[in-house]
Amino acid sequence: MTTPREPDSAAPLRPVVDCLVVGGGPVGLLTAVLLGQAGLRVTVVERQPQRYPLPRACTIDHEALRILQAAGLMDDHAGLFEPSRGERGGYEFRNGEGELLRAIDWNRPAESGWANTNGFYQPDLEAALEALAVATPGVEVHRGWTFQDLAQDQDGVSVQVTPTGQPAGAVQVRSRWLVGADGANSPVRSRLGIEVGDSGFEADWLVVDYQPLAEENWSAFVTQYCDPAQPATAVNSGPGRRRFEFMRRADTTVEELGRDSTAWRLMAPWGVTPETARLERHAVYTFRGRWARGWREGNTFLAGDAAHLMPPFLGQGLCAGLRDARALTWRLGMVHQGLASPDVLDTYGPERTGHVRKIIDEAVAAGRVICELDAGRAAARDAEMRKLSGDPGAAAQEPPHPRLGEPSLTVAGKDADGRLAPQGRVRAGDRTGLFDDVVGGGWQLISRAGDPAALLGAEDVSWFRQIGGVIADVSDEGPVQDLDNAYGRWFTEHDCEVFLARPDFYVFAAGEHTDIPRFVSLLRRAVQPAAQDGVLPRGNQGGTS
């Protein structure tokens, strides 16, 4: 077995690159991989000399796994992720007495071809992403370098970085684009002067990661203990690991909450003791809901925690960051290759802001339910949740999947545009597997009513394939067999026959089979230079975009 190459932090930084990524966490590394695969020269600078060895994020959803699939990570690393299980649907709310108040089905089949919700160990994911980045032609990862300053002009960004702790050793890197994926306290965001919006939610929580030494029996992947005496969360945090989270009460200081003795005392009611578990990490975090009011300034973009923060109650923080990476990189890749106008970059921020704000709002709302400390209000909450427990619709509630924010690079239709497109298992010829692996990712034009290419001229087909598009007929007579009826269900649910999906898996347009020529024509107009054909981003005018 070949040992993965490590970043060569002693190597000099290239003076000129296509994109400089500040931040070597999962979002920054994925950004670099996807841009490198698109042919860009990419340098990642990370201030820490070594990868952080302890867990942080521990939950990832099906859409994020499809993004990792697109990067080529899942072929060898699918085993890093443990799907949600649980007899009542994977997500439970219980009161202080342990009574089940509500169960939500997070174990259902998901649109993206992967398990809906999964636990994972972040150090393992970061190691796999870093190895993939280092192995990607054109990508270099440099640890132990700190961002200091930037200056922009029309053609790019001049960035000053220094060896961490050595401010006298400044080096300048010239880059066409800069991506700040440098965390919640983002120096890049601060340097740009971008303001941050705040939901007003703030709560200190102790996060405890441990490895069970004895078999544990949990009825859900996530359990929220809505106990006004001590709100708590128990969650699967990847193969062989678990996590507890405990809210800080007013009669406990942050210093007291952060002691390992406090962690053991709070976990004891569940039988987690020094004899039954190995404590891996305990740290106090302040859970907040925040977002950058701008995601782009000139040729500099924000992604990940630099652009948004949310309480962890829905397990969507890292997922949102990986969505940022995919949404930004397909745009930058097409512009770099001369396949799209730089105007397509204008919708990155609005689309992602509108999308992530809805998830932040839902996470904050869940947090307000869980964090209730008043016994009377908690009792009223419990009574209301008991009523919901008898509603099948409430049990079937899914994790949030909002549509893209506006203006967006989509065509207005019934309801599918701007929403997540499906990926199912298919058979094409002698190959069977997930669609993106068997037929192809990138732009996808898929119909259940016949061959889309039959309605297009040769020039349109050639152009669509040039931008990385794939065309598929998943009808009963088509060459691509929809093995589990994933596409059939999606088309029925959205009352359409065809969709055109973007490389980030969001629907550009959906409608009737006969709409195909119009959709391709609108896509060409949307990505080509405005001086040639006019860009029609949805939200800037009525009708189509």
Image (tube, rainbow, N blue to C red):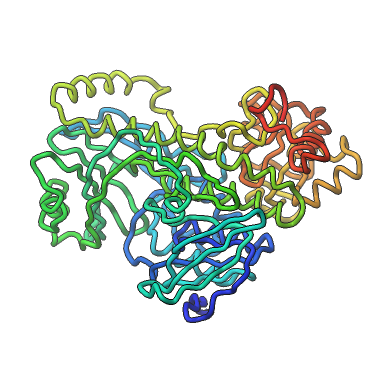
Q: Residue furthest left?
A: 251
Horizontal relation, residue 515 to residue 140: left or right:
right
Residue in the picture at 18% in, 22% down: 377
Q: Residue furthest right?
A: 458
**Residue 189 locus on image (x, y percent):** 45, 50
Horizontal relation, residue 232 to residue 325: left or right:
left
Horizontal relation, residue 482 to residue 307: left or right:
right
**Residue 83 showing in the rendered view:** no
For this rendering, which residue is in front, 162 or 66? 162
For this rendering, which residue is in front, 29 or 490? 29
**Residue 19 locus on image (x, y percent):** 60, 61
For this rendering, which residue is in front, 451 or 193? 193
**Residue 484 locus on image (x, y percent):** 62, 40
Q: Is residue 166 above or below residue 322?
A: below
How many numbered badges does the structure rendering display?
0
**Residue 365 locus on image (x, y percent):** 34, 30
For this rendering, which residue is in front, 188 or 439? 188
**Residue 242 showing in the rendered view:** yes
Residue 529 figure quarter:
top right
Residue in the picture at 57% in, 63% down: 158
Residue in the picture at 44% in, 48% down: 60
Q: Is residue 4 above or below residue 313?
A: below
Q: Is residue 278 above or below residue 378?
A: below
Quadrant of the image containing the C terminus: top right
